[in-house]
Image (spheres, helix red, strand yellow):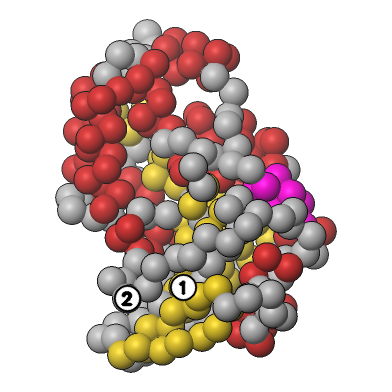
Amino acid sequence: MEALLTSRAVPVQVPCRKLSSLSDDLSCLELRRYPCRRGGVSIMSHPRLVRLVTASVQPQRVSALGHQGNTAPSKEILDLWGNVEAVCFDVDSTVCVDEGIDELAEFCGAGKAVAEWTARAMGGSVPFEEALAARLSLFKPSLSKVDEYLEKTPPRLSPGIEELVKKLRDNKIDVYLISGGFRQMINPVASILGIPRENIFANNLLFGNSGEFVGFDEKEPTSRSGGKAKAVQHIRKGSSYKTMVMIGDGATDLEARIPGGGLVHMLRWSSAS
């Protein structure tokens, strides 16, 4: 998760309080700027419930937002939430508190080995498609095993996510799920949050006639590095959105920034321990 942070920008934890509006918990922030070779990164603190880090695509600047006391939200934060038309969420360790593939692997008896690969994939040290194939090859989940896991393990949502998604939808802001996880495990999450299936971009496990694992759908954009950026681009092409937000916790989420500009912002959601 630290792949999204610069060495100069460290999130600051502040006391937890209940989320009451889209901008309420984005207060107490002060903007500081540092030179950067690529797109700008704005980092903001959030209550113990979550920490948010926002990276907006602005050339030549990095912006760090730190806690400065009980002040009103900055104009930059208010403008962001006042103009946003769509929010795209990562799922693993963002909407949900765990990594879905790690939990499924643990259920199938290969948790430790798969978790090590997940850490490498999240940090961006290996191509995502390589890490995905390697992890699945370690335990090859059958259809019956996936169904058993889903029956015995209901989704564990991050604290506050249902409320946040409801507030977004109440404010006529469209919500999407963009994940390197699997549709079989994400569909129940989307149902709980009231997100339509057509707003899900995720991978798909493939099974043979007897339910045996045969692989994953490599045509899904999220099955490879840079896939989340392609998913965001697909959403933008099919809509009139001028300002979008991507909320996630890993290197693949940071890739969702559109090269060359565009009002797409990156927010980092990290459940506090």
Under mark 1, the amino acid is Ile
- The residue at the point 35 percent across, 67 percent down is 5
Residue 13 in the image, given as x and y percentages of width and height: 52, 60
Residue 41 in the image, given as x and y percentages of width and height: 41, 77
Residue 102 in the image, given as x and y percentages of width and height: 36, 30
Residue 86 in the image, given as x and y percentages of width and height: 64, 66
163 in magenta: yes
179 in magenta: no
Can residue 123 be seen by looking at this rendering?
yes
Which residues, given as a range, are shown in magenta? 160-167
In the rendered view, tell whether residue 204 sits above or below residue 61.
Answer: above
**What numbered label is drawn on residue 8?**
2
- The residue at the point 35 percent across, 88 percent down is 34
In the rendered view, tell whether residue 164 sits above or below residue 145.
Answer: below
**What numbered label is drawn on residue 43?**
1
- The residue at the point 57 percent across, 78 percent down is 68
In the rendered view, tell whether residue 40 sits above or below residue 14.
Answer: below
Q: Quadrant of residue 14?
A: bottom right
Q: Quadrant of residue 181?
A: top left
* Relative side of 139 to 23, left or right: left
Per the image, label 1 sits on a secondary structure element best described as: strand
Residue that lies at the very extreme toward the right in this rendered image = 170
Q: Quadrant of residue 157?
A: top right
Per the image, label 2 sits on a secondary structure element best described as: loop
